[in-house]
Image (cartoon, helix red, strand yellow):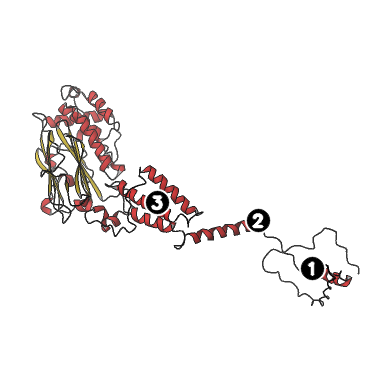
Amino acid sequence: MMRKKRKRGAPPGPCRRHGPRPATAPAPPPSPEPTRPAWTGMGLREAPSSAAAAAAEVEQRRRPRLCPPPLELLLLLLLSLELLHAGDCQQPAQCRIQKCTTDFVSLTSHLNSAIDGFDSEFCKALRAYAGCTQRTSKACRGNLVYHSAVLGISDLMSQRNCSKDGPTSSTNPEVTHDPCNYHSHPGAREHRRGDQNPPNYLFCGLFGDPHLRTFKDHFQTCKVEGAWPLIDNNYLSVQVTNVPVVPGSSATATNKITIIFKAHHECTDQKVYQAVTDDLPAAFVDGTTSGGDGDAKSLRIVERESGHYVEMHALYIGTTVFVRQVGRYLTLAIRMPEDLAMSYEESQDLQLCMNGCPVSERIDDGQGQVSAILGHSLPRTSLVQAWPGYTLETANTQCHEKMPVKDIYFQSCVFDLLTTGDANFTAAAHSALEDVEALHPRKERWHIFPSSGNGTPRGGSELSVSLGLTCLILIVFL
């Protein structure tokens, strides 16, 4: 039988992809290999015989032809090699970018933007991170993780206004533990780790006629004439003295504040600060402006505006106090860790910041307004004026200029203008809200709005609010 002649140029048969051979029938035993042709000189072989050429052609057709690998497989192989190379660069003996990043996370995990000294400590950690990347730059050349970290550090330093030169943090936070820095305590650090809005810091504020915001974010308007304790625990005591604002009215305002920072181990001796109307000192009563030894004082006073605004920073107890004089009266705002604020005995339970004003001293219903604000009406003649110079309309207009959000601070401003006629109370309410934004750890709780019985914000008409404020004014003067 004659064998069909293969077309010129056609492949000798289908190629086989890389992989295991498919099962086939056993091949016949190979024919004896033809004798290798002898060299004829000048690098040329003797032409093979026709029988040898035919045998070689049969053997070539019997062997499966391997196809070249597809392009995708080649690309995958190259990518794998690059990843392996990048992984090698991250080994401790070579590129140490992973170690740099781990140290930075360790240095910043306990920091929180709501506490004092955050920017300073964060910049120190960033500079340490930048220094670590510089030391490993040669070994990390071509490492994408390294270059991403360098760009990220540059962006963060710009955002936080960090200078490139300055002190850096130690890569071992435990070594730098400061017993007179509350924020560096291991317990406090673990308690706050990963919390963007930590609930363990409390805020209390007092301003105006007077209006009290407690540690529990309850808002009250109180009489509390005379001396009253705002805070009284094992670390801090704050007492305020309130005097009548208008003769014949139960409305009062604060004209004296006394703050006692109690002695605390080796961090500070007892320090007393006292402010009265027209005397807002930038020093403690003993004439000093700080407490504690060393350059980094654990307690210090910072004067922001001479005679009008001072801040006290007690680093050893993680506490910040703002005291202002607005017009003739004083305002106070404080932030303190919850665990320290709760450290008091049963005999110290009379604390306005902790439990609010006694019921007999409140002018409102516990939400910063009298029950009439919920909808009780009054005769129209009562809506004309509460104090010479201000009507409900003009008071609303003046307060709205300072406080566009009509929350409880706006309503307190209107109430104070109508009961006293003193325009300085507008500035007092506005500065009180600024202090909330500076010290309160929970941004979603900065504004307090009138609420119904179930705690949801009320959407009542402005007339209802106006009637309620007028009713509140009448209660004050009765």
Q: Is residue 212 visible?
A: no
Vertical comparison of 78 with 43: above or below: above
Q: Between disc 3 and disc 2, whose residue precedes? A: 2
Q: Which residue is mark 2?
A: 71
Give the x, y percent position of residue 424.
19, 29
Mark 1 or 3, nearer chain start: 1
Residue 365, quarter of the rendered image? top left
Q: Secondary structure at mark 3?
A: helix
Amino acid type at circle 1 is Gln
**Image quarter (top left, top right, bottom left or bottom right) of the N terminus:** bottom right
Which of 377/315 is in front? 315
* Cβ atoms at labels 3 and 2 below 8 Å apart: no
**Secondary-structure class at tag 1:** helix
Mark 1 or 3, which is nearer the eye? 3
Q: Looking at the image, which residue is at 23% across and 35% down?
A: 431
Residue beneath disc 1: 60
Per the image, the residue denoted by label 3 is: 130
Q: Earlier in the sequence, mark 2 or mark 1?
A: 1
**Residue 220 on image: x %, y %:** 19, 39
Amino acid found under the numbered disc labelled 3:
Ala
Residue 311 left/right relative to 457: left
x and y percentages locating residue 392 in the rendered image: 22, 25
